[in-house]
Structures are given as C-alpha cells and as structure tokens.
C-alpha cells in the first residue's frame, strides 16, 4: 500500500478528518510518510492503538520521535528529554519519576482539591457575570480556571500569579517567537520557584517533592513544566471546545441541564468525541513487532491517531454521534498504558466542576456569534477554539 500523509482537513469543527475513517476501514495500521520523508505507520483502530500504547516494544523516548505534521525536525537539534521530563522517557527512568508522583494524584488527593477548584470557578463566573454579555468564554473562564488551579497545585505565590498566568497562557498561543520566549520564561520562573521551596518549606506539590525526594532543581523544574503543560492545555481546551460542542447541540445541553447526574459520563464522552490531541501520540519500535498483521520493524515510528481510535465503531457504536448517556470508558484521549496521563483525575475534576457550574449559573448560555464564525485551533497539536463569544 502506498504511504499516506497525515490527514488534517476537517469538514466539521467537531469531527476528525474524514480520510481517517476511510483509512481505518481499509486497515487499522497504514503506512505513513512523515514530513522528513521517513516511512512509518499510522494507527487508526482502537484495539491497535491500545496495543501500541501499552506494549513495551514501543518507546516514548523524545530523541526517537518524529512529528506527523509540520516542518521536519533538525537532526542536530533532536535531544533526549531533560531530567525529570518523564513523559518522553522509558522505564526505568520513567518508572522512577512516575512512582514519585503517583501518590500525589490519588482520588483522595483530588477530593481534597475540590473546594479550592470550586472557589476558583465561582470567582471566574462572578467576573463573567459582572462584565455582562457578550464575553469570550476562553479568555474569562476556560484559560484562567486551569491556570489558577495549577498555581494552587504548584504553590505559586499570590503576588506572582498574574505573571505566571500570562507566560503559561502564552505557551498556548500561536506566535512561535512568543511561545519560545514563554518556554524560557516559564522554566526560569519554575527553577526559581523550586529554589524558594528549598529555602522555605511549603505545603504544596513542589514543596512536598523538595522535602520528600532526592530530586534536584532541574528535575523538579522539568516536572513542574510537564504538569503545567499537560494539566493546563488539556483542561483549557476541553472547557472551551466542550462548551462549544454542547451549545451547538441544544438537545444534549438541555439533557445535561435537566439531569446533572449525567456529568461524569458526559465529560468522558466529550473527551472521546472531541479527541483534542488531534495529531496523535507517537512511539518508536525497539524491535520487530506485529500489530494487526502488519510487521513494524525496529526503528520505525508509529503515530496513534487519537481521534480515529476514539471514533472506531468496533469499540464505540454510532461513534460520530455525541451521546452524553454513553459509557465512553476506554477512550484514549489521556493515552493508555504506563504513559497514561498522571493528572487525568485533576483534569476530569476541573471539567466536571466547570461544566456543572457553567450550566447552573448560565442556563440560557448561547453563542454570541454564528457557529461557523468560531475559529478553531486547527494548527496546533492540541485542538480547541481560539475564542468562544457567549451571551445569556
């Protein structure tokens, strides 16, 4: 079969490129041409996706990766992950960092954060109400809520929060130069924050890690950065595009408003349906391995299409329909296997509380512009909306 390039053209803001479904029907593992000319594989089937993401024959190491879209990486610039950035490490390094953090994201720990998150959400909704319609839900709610939650989690001092928010939000922007500047800025800030935690004990995540582990300042800085990116970007984009999807489907919005008990399943279904890691998750074969009858050879790169896997009709009946009563467990939006998002409990909590409060405060919430005027973040690894003007 002739290699394909990663499909990126969407005909609907909520549906993946139609070409992905066609490729999945032909075969769940398809030869893929990467931007640098390398031939690897595109996984579009749900079962194959879970196999690749859980099989230790596939490596997550940063220096082995290739991105399926965008300009090819400069080989001279490809480096291993910095100490502490365990998302792109394999065991045993990944295992060590993950074990140190695992106990800090338990359900009990998440429940302890609930009242603080509710207070942040209430304050942001108060501000929206004070400003009056129309307001940009992204600017006033979807971005600041997870940013402020991350401030609480990492122990960012109150007087630094405006600065922290501004540089963390710049990382979600679209200006490459500003993003690079923000990357340097956030790492410089976090490194200084870690050193402040060493000087004075603090009751927060970074303070605990300083006090209870032997991690050095660089490792702690990388962990802080990873948690910021993973926690902030997913939640911010899901609160924005999730609200857009609900407002675009009045029947689902009304059902959720009438029965708030649907919210846990609704959040999982929105994660499945929207699949915001739009270009997928990439792994590299460490040895020859067969997946769904395809022989993937050592050194070949595999990209798992999260949107395609989450719309696989073999796993999710009528997958192209948003159904808030569906049990969407098993979706791969948070990944799968040992690299499954460590902070997913926090993200789920933010979304459950955020959508619930939004429904209660603004039951008549609606788009302030036609749906086809909403500009999508189609050019980013994480999909979402640039802005969401709403009124009530």
Image (cartoon, grey):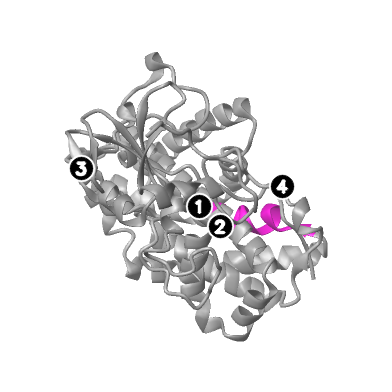
Instruction: Kindly identify which numbered label has been placed on residue 234.
Output: 1
Q: Relative to the observer, which residue lies in front, 249 or 28?
A: 28
N-terminal-most mark, 4 or 2: 2
- Picture layout, residue 349 above or below residue 228: below
Q: Give the spatial CA distance, label 1 vs label 2.
A: 6 Å
**Residue density around tag 3, few if under 14, some if 14–19, many if 20 or more, within 10 Å:** few
Instruction: Kindly identify which numbered label has been placed on residue 375.
Output: 4
SS at circle 4: loop
Whole-percent x, y for residue 77 in the image:
40, 17
Given contact means CB atoms under 8 Å apart, are the residues at marks 1 and 2 in contact? yes
Q: Give the spatial CA distance, label 3 vs label 2.
A: 34 Å
Residue linked to disc 3: 290
**Residue density around tag 1, few if under 14, some if 14–19, many if 20 or more, within 10 Å:** many
Q: Which residue lies most toward the bottom here?
A: 258
Q: Residue at x 42, y 74 (%)?
A: 327
Residue linked to disc 2: 238
Given contact means CB atoms under 8 Å apart, are the residues at marks 4 and 1 in contact? no
Whole-percent x, y for residue 357 in the image:
61, 73
Q: Give the spatial CA distance, label 4 vs label 1.
A: 18 Å
- Picture layout, residue 134 above or below residue 384: below
| Magenta-colored span | 135-147
Q: Give the spatial CA distance, label 4 vs label 2.
A: 15 Å
Q: Is residue 214 left or right of residue 242?
A: left
SS at circle 2: helix
Whole-percent x, y for residue 66 in the image:
39, 29
- Picture layout, residue 363 above or below residue 27: below
N-terminal-most mark, 4 or 1: 1
């Amino acid at each position: 079969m002739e290699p394909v390039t990663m499909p990126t053209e969407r005909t609907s803001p909520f549906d993946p490129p139609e070409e992905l479904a066609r490729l999945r029907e032909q075969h769940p593992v398809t030869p893929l041409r990467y931007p640098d000319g390398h031939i690897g594989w595109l996984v579009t089937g749900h079962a194959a996706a879970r196999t690749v993401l859980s099989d230790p024959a596939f490596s997550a190491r940063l220096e082995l990766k290739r991105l399926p879209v965008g300009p090819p990486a400069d080989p001279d610039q490809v480096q291993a992950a910095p100490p502490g950035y365990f998302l792109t490490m394999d065991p045993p390094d990944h295992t060590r960092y993950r074990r140190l953090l695992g106990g800090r994201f338990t359900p009990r720990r998440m429940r302890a954060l609930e009242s603080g998150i509710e207070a942040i959400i209430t304050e942001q909704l108060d501000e929206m109400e004070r400003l009056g319609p129309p307001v940009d839900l992204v600017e006033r709610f979807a971005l600041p809520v997870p940013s402020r939650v991350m401030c609480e989690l990492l122990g960012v001092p109150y007087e630094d929060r405006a600065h922290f928010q501004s540089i963390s939000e710049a990382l979600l922007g679209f200006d490459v130069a500003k993003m690079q500047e923000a990357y340097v800025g956030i790492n410089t800030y976090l490194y200084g924050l870690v050193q402040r935690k060493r000087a004075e004990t603090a009751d927060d995540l970074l303070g605990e890690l300083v006090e209870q582990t032997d991690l050095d300042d660089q490792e702690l800085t990388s962990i802080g950065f990873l948690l910021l990116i993973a926690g902030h970007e997913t939640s911010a984009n899901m609160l924005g595009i999730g609200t857009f999807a609900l407002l675009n489907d009045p029947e689902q919005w009304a059902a959720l408003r009438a029965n708030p008990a649907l919210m846990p399943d609704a959040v999982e279904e929105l994660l499945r349906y929207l699949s915001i890691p739009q270009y997928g998750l990439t792994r590299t074969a460490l040895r020859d391995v067969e997946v769904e009858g395809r022989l993937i050879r050592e050194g070949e790169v595999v990209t798992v299409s999260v949107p395609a896997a989450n719309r696989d009709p073999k796993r999710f009946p009528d997958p192209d329909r948003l159904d808030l009563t569906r049990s969407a467990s098993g979706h791969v939006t948070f990944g799968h296997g040992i690299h499954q998002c460590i902070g997913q409990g926090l993200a789920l909590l933010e979304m459950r509380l955020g959508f619930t409060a939004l429904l209660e405060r603004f039951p008549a919430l609606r788009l302030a512009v036609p749906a086809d005027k909403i500009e999508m973040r189609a050019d980013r690894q994480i999909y979402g909306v640039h802005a969401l003007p709403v009124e009530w």
